[in-house]
Image (cartoon, grey):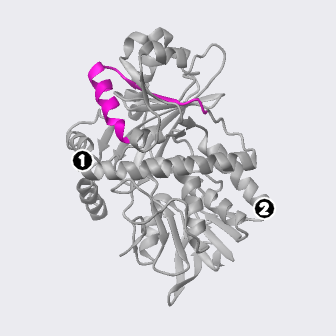
């Protein structure tokens, strides 16, 4: 069967890989000239079942209300006139109950554990090297009360099968010597030994190359404009370079899945949530964190890829704006300097901002669309790197008529 995968981010490329393994003829289409050029380009890089909490929660709702009048929070709000945003925001708010947050967290954790095993399998099969670190992650807390509350909250992760244990500053320094000189700056941490990190962009581009070696056609620099349908089937995709016909289609375009999905009669509740990152080269006497993790009080994440360290922060509820200004990074950089003063070569930073395809319940959208040969693999939010290999296998199984190992019931796309 000829399958057209729409999107060449980490989700689209992993989907293409799984379809090739199943024996399909695969074409990948993306408007960017290289794979992983948007959300997958410079994300946090963490594979983190130990941090798979639902963003939509009572705490997030309170923070969002504060963000209406403040601009110094990790969660930011930019006023929107787009009706689609307010429709999404109402759906998000309705998910911010304790009961729904717990249920969504359990599903996020289950999918994370399944997908992590799939990622390890792909890495073993392909031999791709992308700066993976598999010694766990540290989630730091500045005050004892916050640490105690986080330890209590982590029960839901432990019940779902994730190992998370509380460690003192001394134990954190034993796990990662970078904390030896700053032990007085935090109360302790939660350590998730199963969490990992790696460069999603490098992984995606290497996997795309292997897809091409297996016979996949990569149609990059080609913008999808519309679809041609007939009855209950998608006949072709119309692009700025012509028409692409296939037997089946997979929509894996991240944030852009929503507007294109409407052309196919789908209501995909996805809104772009902007994140910011700084990547520093590691050289000479730099002393970066060895393990990935999160400074929970300042809400910045960090990951070490061997020759670079990635620093990420902020969830900005705005529009389709990829731009960034120096002041957008100031709060994060101040907190990073305090904790990791020698994290990398500060004279050569790479600044970036990207859009996370966030759904109201923070879970992906997986399954068949309105047309019987259309499949959807999108809406991964901040977990794309963690989930990609898992959802790719799930969608490939659904397309083949097999029952997936992880059940995506309830995550199917809805008609508009």
Give the residue at x 35% y 47%: 54
Task: Provide residue 264's location: percent of width, then percent of height.
Answer: 46, 77
Give the quadrant of residue 258.
bottom left
Q: Earlier in the sequence, mark 1 or mark 2?
A: 1
Indicate whether residue 142 is drawn in magenta.
Answer: yes
Give the residue at x 69% y 46%: 123
Q: Is residue 406 left or right of residue 320?
A: right
**Residue 354, visible in the rendered structure:** yes
- Name the residue beneath numbered marker 1: 98
Task: Provide residue 111's location: percent of width, then percent of height.
Answer: 48, 52
Q: Which residues are magenta?
A: 134-156
Task: Provide residue 122's location: percent of width, then percent of height.
Answer: 68, 50
Residue 234 in the image: above or below residue 6: below
Describe the element under mark 1 as helix, strand or loop: helix
- Name the residue beneath numbered marker 2: 214
Describe the element under mark 2 as helix, strand or loop: loop
Residue 407 in the image: above or below residue 358: below
The front one of 350 and 415 is 415
Residue at mark 1 to residue at mark 2: CA–CA distance: 47 Å
The front one of 97 and 41 is 97
Disc nearest the viewer among 1 and 2: 1
């Amino acid at each position: 069967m000829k399958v057209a995968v729409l999107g060449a981010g980490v989700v689209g490329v992993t989907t293409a890989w799984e379809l090739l393994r199943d024996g399909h003829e695969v074409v990948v289409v993306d408007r960017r000239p290289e794979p992983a050029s948007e959300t997958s380009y410079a994300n946090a890089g963490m594979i983190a079942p130990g941090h798979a909490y639902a963003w939509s929660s009572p705490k997030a709702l309170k923070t969002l209300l504060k963000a209406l009048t403040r601009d110094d929070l990790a969660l930011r709000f930019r006023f929107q006139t787009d009706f689609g945003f307010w429709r999404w925001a109402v759906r998000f708010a309705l998910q911010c109950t304790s009961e729904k947050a717990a249920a969504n967290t359990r599903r996020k954790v289950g999918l994370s554990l399944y997908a992590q095993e799939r990622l390890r399998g792909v890495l073993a099969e392909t031999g791709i090297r992308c700066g993976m670190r598999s010694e766990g992650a540290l989630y730091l807390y500045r005050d004892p009360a916050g640490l105690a509350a986080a330890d209590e909250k982590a029960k839901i992760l432990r019940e779902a099968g994730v190992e998370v244990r509380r460690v003192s500053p001394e134990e954190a320094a034993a796990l990662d010597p970078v904390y030896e000189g700053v032990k007085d700056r935090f109360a302790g941490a939660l350590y998730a030994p199963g969490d990992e990190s790696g460069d999603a962009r490098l992984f995606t581009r290497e996997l795309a190359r292997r897809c091409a070696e297996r016979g996949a056609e990569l149609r990059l620099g080609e913008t999808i404009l519309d679809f041609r349908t007939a009855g209950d089937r998608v006949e072709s995709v119309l692009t700025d370079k012509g028409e692409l016909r296939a037997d089946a289609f997979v929509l894996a375009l991240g944030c852009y899945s929503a507007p294109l999905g409407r052309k196919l009669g789908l209501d995909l509740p996805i809104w772009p949530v902007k994140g910011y990152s700084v990547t520093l080269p590691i050289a000479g006497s730099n002393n970066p964190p060895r393990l990935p993790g999160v400074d929970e009080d300042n809400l910045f994440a960090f990951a070490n890829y061997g020759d670079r360290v990635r620093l990420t922060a902020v969830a900005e509820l705005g529009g389709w704006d990829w731009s960034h200004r120096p002041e957008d990074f100031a709060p994060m950089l101040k907190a990073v300097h305090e904790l990791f003063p020698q994290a990398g070569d500060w004279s050569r930073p790479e600044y970036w901002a990207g859009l996370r395809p966030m759904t109201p319940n923070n879970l992906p959208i997986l399954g068949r669309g309105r047309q019987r040969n259309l499949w959807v693999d999108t809406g991964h939010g901040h977990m794309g790197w963690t989930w990609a290999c898992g959802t790719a296998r799930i969608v490939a199984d659904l397309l083949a008529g097999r029952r997936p190992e992880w059940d995506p019931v309830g995550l199917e796309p809805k008609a508009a």
